[in-house]
Image: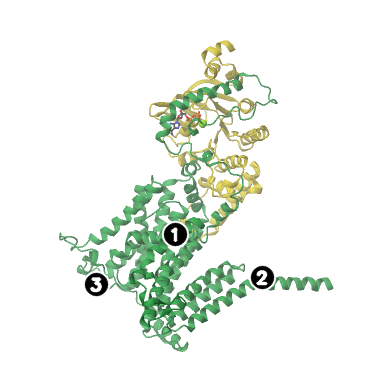
Amino acid sequence: MPLLEARGVTKRFGGLIAVQNVDYCIEPHTINAIIGPNGAGKTTFFNLMTGIYTPDEGRIIFDGKDITGLKPNRINQAGIARTFQNIRLFGAMTVIENCLVGMHRRLHVDWVQAILRPPAFNRQEREAQRRVEELLDFVGLRDKANEVAKNLPYGDQRRLELARALASEPKLLLLDEPTAGMNPQETAAAMQLFRAVRDEFGITVLLIEHDMRVVMGISERVTVLDYGQKIAEGSPEEVRRNPRVIEAYLGRGSAASYI
Amino acid sequence: MATQSLLQERASRLNWREALPTIFAILYVLIVFSLLRSLNRADLWFPTYSSILFPLFVFSPFIIFALKIPFALRAVLIAIIGLVLMPILGMQDSFYLELITQIAIFAAMAIGLNVVVGFAGLLDLGYVAFFAVGAYLWGIFTSNANTIVRISGAQAAPELFWLFLFLGVIAAAITGILLGLPVLRLRGDYLAIVTLGFGEIIRILVSNLSNISSNRRNPINITNGAQGLPGILSPPLPDFMFQAVESLTNSLGLPVNNVRAFTYQLFYYGLVLIVCALSALIAARLDNSPIGRAWTAIREDEVAAQAMGVPKVKMKLLAFALGASFAGAMGVIFAARNTFVSPESFSFIQSIFILAVVIVGGMGSIRGAIFGAAIVTLLNLQVLKNFSLQINALRNIDWVVPIIDFPIRNWPQQLEPARYERLVFGLLLIVMMIFRPSGLLPAKRRQLELQGERAERISEKELTADVAEIRPEDLLSAPAAIGEAKEAKAANAADIAEDLPADQPPTPGEGLPDEPKEKP
Ligand SMILES: Nc1ncnc2c1ncn2[C@@H]1O[C@H](COP(=O)(O)OP(=O)(O)O)[C@@H](O)[C@H]1O
Ligand SMILES: [Mg+2]
């Protein structure tokens, strides 16, 4: 059974159809990529899966449950976490606090307890802190735990966003252009991290990528969007050879001459 | 042996040096206190002296709090200032007790507003409405005005004060939720306008819920309208308290005229101090809990917070409800202490006043809220008024300013300092915003931010939302974006078509053109 299944999902912005009748499946424990030119609707598709937008048509089933139209926090609770194309950290909060917010749905949140501080509350806080520290170890931010997020260098901000998303212990992790703006070394390190996310935590990964080395290097399945429509899907090799993909990327005439 | 004694000596010298600030602080408190004690109301310059010395005295707990000594020690010193020195000053001149009580009332409300504005980032310009709810709750049930409650004989016994204190908290919290529900989707200035309107609605409601409102005769009188509610009751105090206060004041050689009134003053002082301390404790604990973190996250980035599993609706309502409850408690106490409430006490300017306290002190800072309350209240109720008193006193004796030979009786009435309360207040806020925008005692979080301000930062543009709201520009630029996307395709196509070996990367950045709609 697929972990996530989108059926005929469509999203319009006024006259513009950002995502059009897309069917999409993700198998558990795989690493998947969505590629496509800018404006193809990739980010919008992420926003649909995470509840930030509601699809105009179609349904999204996650883990056997229909999540269409649920609020973003409910969807996060169901087990989908994400990062953003334009990093969206909680700038004024420390690295640790950012991750603790990510853990929100894993904590028992009760204002009476927060005020009275019974032992159970303190235990939970300590435990959360410990888990976050493990995560920071994993992404390599342990020594910056108490720095304020907005003062971190760019690469660290990306890592922190990943750690924050992992803190909610998702089943499916969506990464929107996670290596954008990284140099080749950083990109290579990031790829290793994504693989580790799947192998060590058993989390299914879906990423939007522009960097073809990343796409070809780690994804098992690649889906191509163009003008909101799915135009190809398959292994990296298949997709790369697909004439429709080449056509979408180069225009009709050039495609012919390329082949 | 020699080295050991040397080490010991060094250690003791270090301790001595570390103790110096504490000793200075204690000396400071004692000097200010004894100077205040030595003041005489009959003295010509009394208004000036007291308006300099009393603020210095009020700052002393903050100075103590800033010392780098164990928390328990600081707590003891502050308790001595608050529970011993302050009551003694009050016996000497009960106006000081009035002032400090007023400060504590504003401090507790500022702490409550801080939960809403500082922690959760929800700008509330109608906060005084919750104060009104608490005040009117106790007022309606104990006032001697001819309200429906009195006519129907449903008045509350004064003993029920403690129950009503609790009910005031609940009522204010419910009102907070009622306000919160319709404004959940609003942010920033829109939220500010709606909350402002809400504050006015409550005020106008209480001034109209009577049978004498405007020209029409309403059947029932609930709030006694613009006339307000007189004769509100205080809770009864046990007799031994009066006796204790009497013997205490006599034994200290500071007998007070009216033991009853003074005992009540002391009682309210203690009560607001307790409520204020509880408010501070509760706010601090909430801030440092999953709830406080969720609030900050919502304040920083609502969309990201939700995507991380933070239930926005629940958390915002919780902020409104908890923030309001502090004001509800203070409202009940205020009504009892003041014995009179009217819609006047809950005007828009009061909300602004509390917000100003939060801003002056430092958004999100609890110490700041208390400090801000002290500054703003002293400025309003003591310093400026005292300057006016001073000028009048000098005018009466036909005093002439030395050196410039200016006869003070020529000082125009229009320029009396007390009339310029709001001007001074406005200037203070402007100066604050220019030189210390994060407040006098900024929140720790804000301090951390400022520390690393120079550190590498990604540009504002990169941080701007990619999904937060649908702006008309986005829709307009969409066709252009598609055009740009076409251009960008070439670069991607090169990547996808070319059979690159993995170890030979393409030029960095080539495959990552900007998001189309971010381009100006
Ligand atoms: N909130 C929005 N309002 C209007 N148009 C939008 C909005 N979000 C995205 N779009 C448009 O939808 C299209 C797809 O955008 P997006 O999903 O961000 O593309 P991608 O991530 O593939 O580059 C673009 O033309 C974009 O301008
Ligand atoms: Mg995108």
Q: How far from the left and from the top, in percent, is residue B3? A: 82, 71
The amino acid type of the residue labelled 1 equals Leu
- Disc 3 to disc 1, C-alpha distance: 41 Å
Q: Chain of mark 1?
A: B
Image quarter of residue A35: top right
Same chain? Circles 3 and 1 = yes
Q: Which residue is mark 2?
A: B18
Image quarter of residue B417: bottom left
Cβ of mark 2 under 8 A from ligand 2: no
Residue B144: which numbered mark, if any? 3
Is residue A74 positioned above or below A41 on the image?
A: below
Is residue B231 positioned above or below A117 on the image?
A: below
The amino acid type of the residue labelled 3 equals Asn
- Disc 2 to disc 3, C-alpha distance: 59 Å
Quadrant occupied by the C terminus of chain A: top right
Q: Which residue appears at 54% of the width and 19% of the height?
A: A249
The answer to which of A135 and A3 lies nearer the viewer is A135
Instruction: Residue lying at the far right in this picture: please name it.
Output: B1
